Structures are given as structure tokens and as C-alpha cells.
Amino acid sequence: MRCPGQDSRYWKHDAIFDTKCPDCGTEIEFFKDQTTCKCKNCGKQVINPKMDFGCASYCQYAEQCMGELPPELLANRDDLMKDRVALKMKMHFRKDFKNVGQATKVARFAAKIAPEERAIPAVVLCAAYLHNIGAKAGTEVAPEEMEKEAVRLGREILEGLRAKEEMTEQVLAILDHIFHPGADEDLNFRCVHDALRIYQLQTANKEKPLTKDELDAALKNDFMTESGRELAVKSVIIK
């Protein structure tokens, strides 16, 4: 059985359309199930602008269904995965808005740090969304237990979404000891760590306002990236 979106039996009048080459402006005719088409004028391989490639982020048959995916889409598959991981995180926590809020805020900080540090955004973002997946609403859970549960649930989620094995292992390596960083962590870990530290400082500052000396000490001793340190200065406001 073919995906209905690619099966010509379900096509309508707009199944064949024209678009312009982004390089030279020549009209290119697309069938809706074509992933790419080469411009006859300049030779550029143009991606189908009306094709929804979202399923390529998780479907194990994506290549067979849509043909050989262009490099641009292969590069985006992992990036699309983070959105599905975020959804799984929210489904897991359901009405536990505190933990959903924490994961979302940490991911937001991580999304700003990762590109500045040239880390792998998809790995960093997936780990950020899953870093507290081992938490339980209204219950104090020891950091070691949270990490252990995060690895278990993280593997279940990522394998269920058919994430690449390499990416899965990189994310799980971060979750394994995110609350117990070592001295020699890789770049992806450092980005997630700093995003989490900013969240923790913001939370502490709301509960009991930090002094300038306390913030300065945290900036000096608790951060692993310069980008994380700079973002913390902007994000933690001392009155």
C-alpha cells in the first residue's frame, strides 16, 4: 500500500504544477510526487516546493516511498525529529505543566546556544526536551534516578520515532549524567548543560533574588560555553 499523498489515484487537478527555478527563473514542471526536478536551463536540482517532507523525519520507508532524498532533506531529517520529540515529551507529561515548562524553556535556551557553539542542533534540542523526562509530578526524584529513567524513556521515544541510531546514542549519552557533568564533556553536552543552568538560575532568582556576587560566581564557575555564559547574563536579571 502506497502513502495516499503519493498515490496518483488520490490526485486532483493540482497534481501537476509549474514553479520557477530559484536560480535562473526558468519555469519547471513538477508532478506532485517528485521530490526534485533538474532545471533544464541552469541544471540546478530544485526541491518540490509543495511537497510535505515532514514524514521523512520518522518514517523508515521514506527513501523507498519518495525516492532518493536530496541532501537538503537528509540534513533536515534530524532537525524535524526534535519537533516530534517535543510532542512526545508533552504527551508524556500531559497536565504536568511545570515539567513541560521546564523542558520547553531549557530547549529554548539550548536552541540559542547550539548554533553559536556550532554543536549539533538536533542532538542538543532532543536532549534538552528529554532532560527531565524522568521527573514525576509532585514527587521529589533523586537526580541519579531521573537520569536513569530519562535514558530509559528517551530510548523508548527515540526508537519509537525511528531516530538514527547514532543520534539516539548521542542524546542518551547526554541524558545519562546531565545532572552530574564531568570535566571533559563533548560540545553537545555542554550546550544542554548551560541551557539547564540558565533555567536553574532563573528559577532560583525568582524564589530568592540573587546578588550580583552570586550571579558572577555562577557565571565564572558553572558554565561550560561562552555562549551559555553570555545568554545567562541577558536572561537572569539582577534587581
Image (cartoon, rainbow, N blue to C red):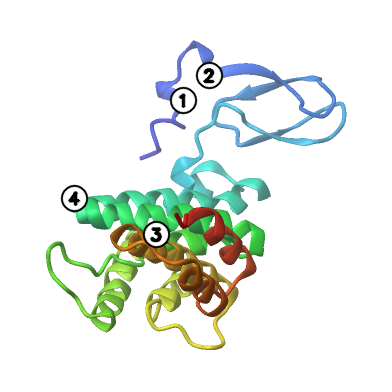
Q: Is residue 169 above or below residue 22?
A: below
Q: Looking at the image, is 239 positioned above or below residue 225? A: above
Label 2 – label 4 distance at C-alpha = 39 Å
Number of the front mark, 1 or 2? 2
- Decide: is 51 above or below 106: above
Image spot of residue 81 (x, y percent): 45, 53
Q: Position of residue 214 (x, y in %)?
A: 46, 72
Mark 1 or mark 2, which has the lower sequence index?
1
Look at the picture and state if 2 lies above or below 148.
above
Neighbours of disc 4 within 10 Å: few (<14), some (14-19), many (20+): few
Give the Cα separation between the discs numbered 1 and 3. 53 Å
| Residue 15: mark | 2
**Split into 4 quadrants, where in the image is the C terminus?**
bottom left
Query: Tag count in the figure?
Result: 4
**What residue is disc 4 on?**
94
Q: Which mark is residue 202?
A: 3
Residue at disc 1, secondary structure: helix
Give residue 8's mark.
1
Q: Amino acid at mark 1?
A: Ser
Residue shown at 49% from the left, 54% from the top: 235
Left or right: residue 77 versus residue 160 is right
Tag 1 and tag 2, C-beta contact below 8 Å: yes
Residue 23 falls left or right of residue 170: right
| Mark 4: amino acid | Arg
Q: Nearer the viewer, mark 2 or mark 4?
A: 4
